[in-house]
Amino acid sequence: CFAAVALQIQCYQCEEMTHDCSTPEFIVNCTVNVQDMCQKEVLVKDDGIHYRKSCASSGACLIASSGYQQFCTGKLNSVCITCCNTPLCNGPRQKKRPQPSAAVTLNRPQVRVFSLHILLLSFILC
Ligand SMILES: *[C@@H]1O[C@H](CO)[C@@H](O)[C@H](O)[C@H]1NC(C)=O
């Protein structure tokens, strides 16, 4: 037998909200070992800014963010997709300047936040 450790992160999840949906009721547990990133889409529409957030696999998120890079202009009908890999990292808008969609924020480890929101699951496999 051996022990295996699985990683689970939490992300904010919402569909086309006209607010940032960065409050606790939008927190979801991502699929263990599969969804290892949080994704955030910011859509600029004529009735305002819409947000779409979810857990994602890194492959899917990186493909989406690079595919939408050309649409990330900040203008009307633009779409920006960002990916990040720390728990709840698709939360409130960063205070620093906005990042283009292809700029993946692979954050340096934020140890305190990490230990608070990450769930380590251990399995015994026989
Ligand atoms: C996420 O998982 C934790 C620990 O298993 C659980 O307490 C919590 O209720 C879960 N949250 C959601 C939104 O499912």
Image: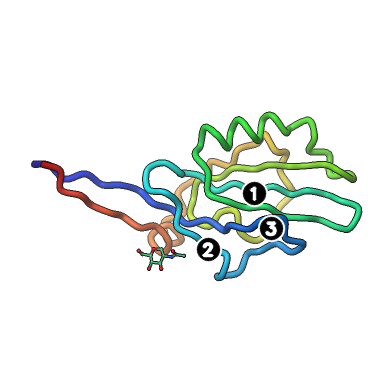
Q: What's under tag 1, amino acid-wise?
A: Lys
Query: Which is more foreground, mark 2 or mark 3?
Result: 2
The label shown at residue 40 is 1
Q: Position of residue 114 (x, y in %)?
A: 42, 57
Q: Residues within 10 Å of mark 1 (few under 14, many from 20)?
A: many
The label shown at residue 115 is none
Q: Earlier in the sequence, mark 2 or mark 3?
A: 2
**Element marked by disc 1:** strand
Ligand 1 under 8 Å from disc 2 Cβ? yes
Quadrant hosting ligand 1: bottom left
Q: What's under tag 2, amino acid-wise?
A: Ile
Q: How is the image coloured?
A: rainbow
Residue 106 vertical placement versus 118 (above, below): above
Q: Residues within 10 Å of mark 3 (few under 14, many from 20)?
A: few
Query: Which is more foreground, mark 1 or mark 3?
Result: 1
Give the labeled residue for mark 3: 93
**Marks 2 and 3, how far apart at CA:** 16 Å
Q: Earlier in the sequence, mark 2 or mark 1?
A: 2
Q: Earlier in the sequence, mark 1 or mark 3?
A: 1
Tell me which residue sits at (83%, 39%) in the image: 73
Q: Quadrant of residue 89?
A: bottom right
The label shown at residue 27 is 2
